[in-house]
Image (tube, coloured by chain):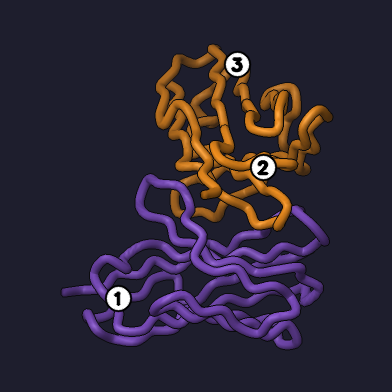
Chain colours: A orange, B purple
Amino acid sequence: GAVVSQHPSWVICKSGTSVKIECRSLDFQATTMFWYRQFPKKSLMLMATSNEGSKATYEQGVEKDKFLINHASLTLSTLTVTSAHPEDSSFYICSASGLRYEQYFGPGTRLTVT
Amino acid sequence: KQEVTQIPAALSVPEGENLVLNCSFTDSAIYNLQWFRQDPGKGLTSLLLIQSSQREQTSGRLNASLDKSSGRSTLYIAASQPGDSATYLCAASTQGGSEKLVFGKGTKLTVNP
């Protein structure tokens, strides 16, 4: 149990376009979902925390207008990178937590902006 | 502000060796501490979760300990195998409930056959 999926697993887009990444909890209801970003040889950095039906809470330094997060249901959260630039190229990972507060991570999405 | 440090950054051992990975955190008011495994280009696989009230957790060849007073956790891997090669991350949850995880940079483990 406790499986989290992400789609797509990788995406290449041109600079200036927007990209949407989906995160789904497949076999449990996630009260909270988290979005992380990981640069090569760096630690995972939390970008934002989202609860179903409410606005996401962004970490300091993360532009909320650039990284749009929607948590429409207890099993789905989306991250949209708007007007992507090459510096947004990174590995984006979501996680979901249920009643036990343990976070279960998705397989990640590799974004490359050309 | 919680900071998590992992030492060493990389470790290479021969197959069969027992090894210890270290994790330290600056704020002892943690809710839980988790150890994860990450294979190259992949997401995270949860290995062990230790609640703040616990001192250790075991799963197969893995044993994780937690010492809140000293701000340390260790992950012990017994009889290492080439398949254990991966990056191991520890993360501390500093607030009650499903709150933020602060990650270390990880230890890249290579087990040589």
Residue A21, position in %: x, y?
54, 26
Chain ID for label 1? B
Q: Amino acid at mark 3?
A: Ser
Residue A5, position in %: x, y?
49, 36
Mark 2 residue crowding within 10 angstroms, few (<14) / some (14–19) / many (20+): many
Is label 3 in contact with label 1 (beta carbons under 8 Å)?
no
Chain ID for label 3? A
Which label belongs to residue A60? Answer: none
Q: Amino acid at mark 1?
A: Ser
Residue B36, position in %: x, y?
50, 62
Dot 3 or dot 2, earlier in sequence: 2
Q: Compared with residue A47, is residue B28 higher up or lower down, i.e. above or below?
A: below
Q: Circle 2 is placed at which residue position?
A: A34
Residue A18, position in %: x, y?
56, 15
Q: Nearer the viewer, mark 3 or mark 2?
A: 2
At 50% from the left and 33% from the top, the residue drawn is A6
Q: Circle 1 is placed at which residue position?
A: B12
Is label 3 in contact with label 2 (beta carbons under 8 Å)?
no
Q: Amino acid at mark 2?
A: Phe
